[in-house]
Amino acid sequence: MNKLSRPAKIACMNTKQILLFTLIFTRALASFAQETPAPEIQKSGNIAFSYGADINMNSAQLFAYGAVLGVDFNLPMRFSTGLFVTASSNGLSNNVIEPSVMARYYLFEKYRFYIQLDLGVSILAEDENINFLFLAGVRSGYRFHIGDIFFIEPFLRAGYPFLAGAGVILGYRH
């Protein structure tokens, strides 16, 4: 017998919808990966779209597993800014959505190893409660370029309220 309240059921449904959207979005991008890009797209651009998987400590009982969607814009002098949304769940009663704004600095000229600051809000739906918490964190990773337009980006992150996390992002530069 399911004893979740109506707000908790809605939060679970919203998390499921976000994860379904992420799955459909990743399948759509993967279908474009098989096409030969136009010559003007092959030159690395100033905007990148990314999606991936994340495991974090957003749960008091277990790890939380989730999906990441993001967009970032290259700025002069090895800086970058953008938006990220992480949706995660422990599969029981804890569902979290973390929209955030990021500022990134690439440590070397080749734009690969970076350190990133994240600021945003953590929307936590746990049991019958929905809470909004301030999100602040630091992320570090390495961007592996695949050809001229694709990349893979493993990362580690730490901050509040998720404590720690790790993941991998796949992306497309335009």
Image (cartoon, rainbow, N blue to C red):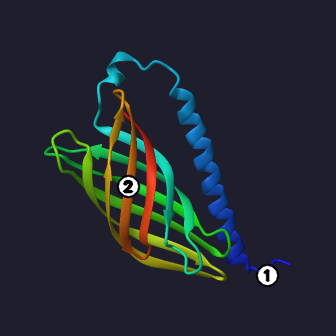
Please state which of the two labelled residues, at mark 2 or mark 1, is closer to the viewer: 2
Q: Earlier in the sequence, mark 2 or mark 1?
A: 1
Question: According to the image, label 1 marks what residue?
Answer: 3
- Residue 69 image position (x, y, % from top left): 47, 51
Few, some or many C-alpha atoms within 10 Å of disc 1 (few <14, some 14-19, many ≥20)?
few
Return the residue at label 2.
155
Disc 2 marks which amino acid? Answer: Phe
**Residue 140 figure quarter:** bottom left
Q: Residues within 10 Å of mark 2 (few under 14, many from 20)?
A: some
**SS of the residue under disc 2:** strand
Q: Is residue 77 left or right of residue 156?
A: left
| Residues at marks 2 and 1 touching, judged by CB atoms closer than 8 Å | no
Label at residue 90: none
> Residue at coordinates 58% horizontally, 35% vertically from top-left?
28
- Can you say whether 38 is above or below 172 in the image? above
User: Where is residue 7 drawn, in percent x and y?
Assistant: 68, 76
**Dot 1: what SS?**
loop
3D distance between C-alphas at marks 2 and 1:
37 Å
In the image: residue 109, left or right of residue 2: left
Q: Quadrant of the N terminus?
A: bottom right
